[in-house]
Image (cartoon, rainbow, N blue to C red):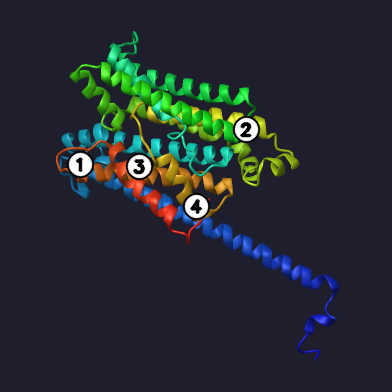
Amino acid sequence: MDAAFPEKDAPAGASSGTATAREQGGYRALIARRLGALFGTCMLLAVSCFADILIGPAFLDVTQVLGALFQPGSADQTVAAIVHIIRLPMTCMALLVGAALGIAGTHMQTILGNPLASPYTLGFSAAAGFGAAAAILLGLAIPWLPDLTIPIAAFAMAGLAAVTVYGFSQLRGMGADVMVLAGIATLFLFQSLQSMVQYLASPEVLQQIVFWLFGSMLKANWTNVSITAIIVLAGAAALIPDLWKLTALRLGDDRAAAIGVDVRRLRMKVFAVVALLTAGAVSFVGTIGFVGLVAPHIARMLVGEDQRILVPMAAATGAVILVGASIISKLISPGTVVPIGIVTAVIGVPFLYSLILNRSRRIW
């Protein structure tokens, strides 16, 4: 009898101590698995980036690309120019924009408690598109910065959309449901304004507007990449001190407030950062849909709700999606590059359907 129940003679705290040790071991194993998933996604991103640089209308082999990347002085000048002036900026821009939209979508879903929340569905991207379209229609050019006129107009309109949504939510209190409704109304408003601008444009101008609205990496250069990188890094770093608060917010406003989280102030800060990230992401490349919606769900399925791991995972996942879309856009029609916004929509819609229909995986 005693052999069957050895714990009878054990100290009183032994059982609880063993259980605690077991729980700690399980938690460490869980964190290790999640970090492993993050590391694997980063490796996939590195491979995708190299493939994106390798693939293009001009055929280059692996040896030529590696030589241009790591020994540019000894590489063929034409190959070095293709890699460093054309393809590498496009790949870096896709990486940065995908990461920004992944982070923005994760934060937006967290503060609003809505699985369909994203910068696209709340009207920020549509506002940026209207700003760019209006600048193209009116032929605006900022003195000393003519090449940045369209991105600045897009950035300004995305900021205006954020202010509009925030203003309406303030009228009724900073509730998540009010912000979602205000965002949807803002989306329809700026889409209508986009349609009006397209209706008023001449055929030549309309072609420019539609091409910008489709989203493309073809105009990426090192100046644009540098500006986008500063915005993305600043926006991501701004919320690092609040990651534990965002994790607590997933438990609900009341529970988060009970442990000392200023929910209203946190939601306002995150909303401002999301607007900054979205505006910086789409102002140079055009409207990119579904990345900010899908990437957070994939990241959440892989690593859970701990924002310390979820946010970098969403950034890596968003970057993988957009770099992958860039690769596909070059393979669809050899010799040309299909606008990347079309590719993300074609990929994103079926994937979103699969997330909804697959009951074996919880997406929220």
- Between marks 1 and 2, how big is the CA–CA gap? 47 Å
Residue 324: x percent and y percent? 32, 46
Question: Residue at position x 43%, y 58% from top?
Answer: 358
In the image, 276: left or right of 204? right
Pointer 1 or 2: first along the chain: 1
Residue 277 visible in rendering: no
Quick one: SS at disc 4?
Answer: loop
Residue at left offset 62%, top offset 45% = 250
Q: Nearer the viewer, mark 3 or mark 1?
A: 3
Instruction: Say which element carries label 2.
Output: loop
Verify CB contact (< 8 Å) between mark 1 and mark 2: no
Query: Of the numbered discs in the image, which one, if any, rests on residue 322?
Result: 3
Q: What amino acid type should be assigned to the residue bearing mark 1?
A: Gly
Extreme residue toward the top, this view? 143
Amino acid type for the residue under numbered disc 4:
Ile
Q: Quadrant of residue 166?
A: top right
Of labels 4 and 3, earlier in sequence is 3
N-term-proximal mark, 4 vs 1: 1
- Name which quarter of the figure residue 228 lies in: top left
Residue at horizontal 48 percent and vertical 42 percent from the top: 116
